[in-house]
Image: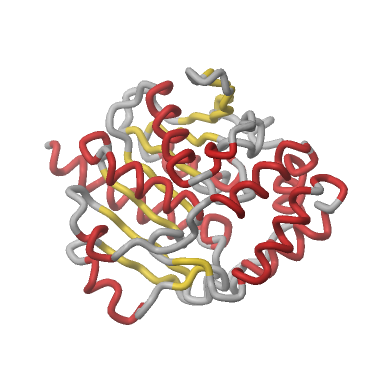
Amino acid sequence: MYPAGEEGIASRFLTLPSGERVHVIEAGPADGLPVLLCHGWGACVYAWSAILPRLAAAGCRVIAPDLRGHGRTDESDARSAYTTPGMTAHLAAIIDALGVDRPLIAGHSMSGRIVLEYAMTAPSLVRGLVLLAPIGVGSLRWFMRYTAPLLALGARLGPIAIRRWIIRVVAGAATGRLRRPTERDIDEYWAPSQWPKFGRAIHRLLVHFDWTALPAERIARLPFPVTVVLGELDPLVVVGDRATYAARIAPQRAVTVARAGHIVTDETPGVVAEEVLRVVDGLVARRD
């Protein structure tokens, strides 16, 4: 499993006050500007495999955790742990345990909503946000209201139901026209799904997490740089009135990647890294 064998990437576990162990990977200079990368529902730190090295090479201190119940991180038995407030508190506990000073945070999909909630609750603890195909900016498309119960049932069955071919179908359906999932992609996302905790976690998130959008005006008022990256062909997240969205969140930035789908971390890692570094450069210029 990633990052085994990857040069320059460290892997370790944090123990939170709750007793949960959280797996994190890190790269880049210890004194670099801290960038925290948070994956989406059903993913893991592998989601950043093509992005993390680019940010580290640019001088950032890059950290990516497996979120609760995902990858090698512990699950929680508490139902409230998988609500939006519960996952936001989980992120806050990770940041406290890391001891990083005001990170720039990138959040993909479900984590878009999580990092937004954290930033709105504690704006003085954040340098900026990069939101990638994010829940919170958009909400799940209408058909997910009807398919989510079936997904939740399948997830609850765990490894019995989560077969490798299912990961292939789901990843393929969420991807646009720029890049198809590779065999390694499928293997890396399928491997952690074979721990029973994974099915329980993604089931609870489907049932208890809030998958709706927040008002654009709240994002516009955040007192630090925010960049939103959307996939033109995203089949899962819908942003209302996308044609005027950039104007609605001004002075914040919105970018739509042509022909990209939902998994922009895999499909367009160069664009994602470029947008993160664009924020980093702006923060460094302000500091200078």
Where is residue 169 shown, x and y percent of the image? 76, 65
Instruction: Please tell me whether residue 14 is drawn above or below residue 176 in the rendered image.
Output: above
The C terminus: image quadrant = top left
Left or right of residue 27, residue 278 in this image: left
Reply above or below: 242 against 284: below
Q: Is residue 12 visible?
A: no
Q: Quadrant of the N terminus?
A: top right
247 over 37 or under it: above or below: below
Which residue is at a point 47% across and 49% down the rendered structure image?
Answer: 111
Q: Which residue sits at x=29%, y=27%? A: 101
Is residue 118 visible in the rendered structure shown here?
yes
Is 111 left, or right, of 46 in this rendering?
left
Q: Position of residue 151 (x, y in %)?
A: 71, 60
Residue in the picture at 56% in, 27% down: 22
Quick one: 150 or 246, which is closer to the camera? 150
User: Which residue of the protein is positioned furthest toward the front in this rendering?
Assistant: 79
* Residue 228 at x, y percent in the picture: 35, 61
Query: In the rendered view, how is the structure colored?
Result: secondary structure
